[in-house]
Image: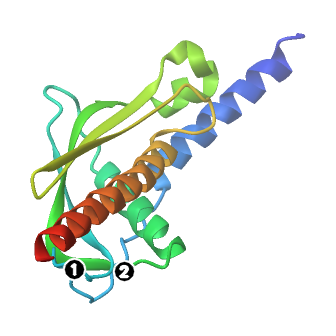
């Protein structure tokens, strides 16, 4: 009888996690109409083209829009436009998602969620990676975090290209 409250709590957590994973809406990515070119003096960052390249992983189609939303959110916080010019190619190279109910019930014992992307733009490369064993946060928070990391990496790639083109113009 002492275990009844514990079991009720576990069942309600599992039900909440299953509800969360099936009913969560993916926000549409926000972009501005300002085109971004590779020319020096251009402001903003290019938009993303996100593809799956993780071998035999089971893709979750909610992940690319969440990465895009995290990228757009980071850009808006930095007062940077996301443009429609040349796109940054982002490939999801490593993906593992725990079952939300198992994640809520067993936390770290259910394993980890993992997301790694490779970023490529005009011959320059970068990566973004995030893992979590948290019982409360799942792939949504990882995807948004990877989107923010992708924004930071793309800013560096764009700045490096602008710096290189500024040197060649002199």
Q: Is residue 136 left or right of residue 43?
A: right
In this view, the residue farthest toward the front is 170
Rounded to the nearest angstrom, the CA distance separating label 1 from label 2 is 8 Å
Q: Secondary structure at mark 1?
A: loop
Label 2 sits on residue: 81
Residue at x-position 18% and y-position 68%: 167
Q: Is residue 112 left or right of residue 62?
A: right
Do tag 1 and tag 2 residues touch (Cβ < 8 Å)? yes
Residue at x-position 57% and y-position 13%: 109
Please determine whether, in this image, residue 5 is positioned above or below residue 145: above
Q: Position of residue 53 (x, y in %)?
A: 14, 37
Q: Nearer the viewer, residue 90 or 3?
A: 90
Q: Quadrant of the C terminus?
A: bottom left
Q: Position of residue 164 (x, y in %)?
A: 19, 63
Which label is found at residue 146?
none
Please determine whether, in this image, residue 131 is positioned above or below residue 168: above
């Amino acid at each position: 009888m002492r275990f009844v409250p514990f079991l009720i709590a576990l069942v309600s957590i599992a039900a909440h996690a299953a509800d969360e994973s099936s009913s969560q809406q993916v926000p549409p990515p926000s972009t501005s109409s300002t085109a971004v070119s590779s020319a020096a003096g251009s402001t903003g960052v290019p938009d993303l083209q996100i593809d799956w390249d993780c071998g035999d992983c089971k893709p979750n189609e909610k992940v690319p829009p969440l990465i895009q939303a995290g990228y757009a959110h980071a850009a808006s916080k930095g007062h940077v436009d996301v443009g429609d010019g040349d796109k940054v190619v982002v490939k999801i190279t490593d993906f593992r998602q725990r079952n939300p109910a198992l994640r809520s019930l067993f936390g770290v014992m259910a394993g980890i969620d993992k997301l790694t992307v490779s970023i490529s733009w005009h011959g320059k490369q970068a990566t973004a990676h995030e893992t979590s064993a948290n019982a409360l946060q799942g792939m949504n928070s990882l995807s948004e975090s990877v989107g923010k990391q992708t924004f930071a990496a793309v800013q560096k790639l764009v700045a490096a290209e602008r710096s290189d083109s500024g040197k060649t113009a002199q």
